[in-house]
Image: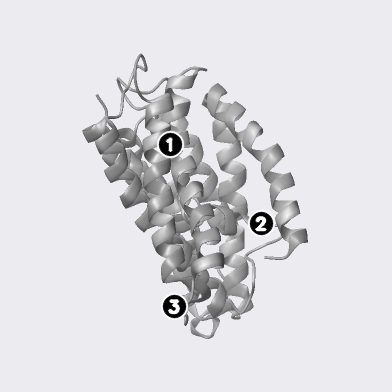
Amino acid sequence: MAKGDLGRRVAVAGVGIPLGVAILFVGGWVLTGTLIVLAVIGTLEVYGLALERGWRPFRVLGVIVAVLLMVLATYLGSFQSWAPWALGLLMVLALGGLAGAVFRRGPGGDPLLAVGTTLLGVAYAALPLAFAVFLRDLPGMGQDGPGWAGAYLVMFPLVVTWLGDTCAYFTGKHLGKRKLLPSVSPKKTVAGGVGGLVGATMGAVAFAALFLGGSAPATLPLLGAALLGLIIGAVAQVGDLAESVLKREAGVKDSGNILPGHGGVLDRFDAIYFTLPLTYAALPFLLQ
């Protein structure tokens, strides 16, 4: 990474982190509005990668479904109530895309690729973000109004994921020799992968000790935090590599340029798409 890129990353983080913390503290429709923006931009970035290959997803239909998924997550308030609606919207997206392929493009319009990439954009870059809402309002452990109890539950996977990513970068830069998966991401190394696991595990323990222990409404034992941190660190690297393989197929360096020094929304949230649902599934079994 060039020094200029590092400086821009630090500047964006200096603004983005306090703003993100404030949004998580407030929660509610403020959080939902933020998630809608991220979901729409991320979905369009996936569609942009598809267009680089000459594939034409149904962008308007995909964006509408992405927005509805975020709105319903807050309106319905729980994963159990939202899941049937989410499944229904994905079915509408698939069948609506097929109908569009029939009446607007025909077999020469690459219907398989068009419908497949339309679904991927929403399922990959929008749907997982809804779990930020469900984590913040986790029944009996989160908080549905402004406050820190629910905010900490969402911050946990975000902080652990990004700490693991940071440790992986610096470990790989200074100690990395053996490549991890050069055909997918030439710069990632085995040493960086190990550093990412260690950083995520230590970050999870530190976060649990500072914010999810003692008098917190929901406490996370340190052993459970370490185990979850290790799993998050591993899954986050899969998410990072998944986006890398999409970009390599499209022949681009970044998914977008909306975040100076960071690239696009996919570049910044690629691992989060994997670790948010994972954390939502795991935390109820670990919190006390």
Q: Disc 1 designates what residue?
A: 156
Where does the image place residue 106, in percent across and percent down from the top left? 51, 80
Q: Nearer the viewer, residue 238 or 69?
A: 238
Of the residues shown, which amino acid type is indicated by label 2? His
- Residue 266 located left or right of residue 135: right
Return the disc, 2 or 1, that comes first in the chain's sequence: 1
Q: How crowded is the residue under tag 2: few (<14 C-alpha within 10 Å), some, or many (20+)?
A: many
Q: Disc 2 designates what residue?
A: 262
| Furthest residue in direction bottom, as rendered | 108
* Label 1 element class: helix
Residues under numbered marks 1 and 3 in contact, where contact means CB atoms less than 8 Å apart: no
Q: How crowded is the residue under tag 1: few (<14 C-alpha within 10 Å), some, or many (20+)?
A: many
Q: Disc 3 designates what residue?
A: 178
- Residue 121 located left or right of residue 281: right
Check the picture and name the quadrant holding the C terminus.
top left
Return the disc, 2 or 3, that comes first in the chain's sequence: 3
**Residue placed at 59% from the left, 50% from the top?**
40
- Residue 88 located left or right of residue 257: left
**Residue placed at 67% from the left, 43% from the top?**
13
Disc 2 versus disc 1: distance between alpha carbons? 21 Å
Question: In the image, which is nearer the foreground, mark 1 or mark 3?
Answer: 3
Observer able to see residue 72: yes
Of the residues shown, which amino acid type is indicated by label 3? Arg
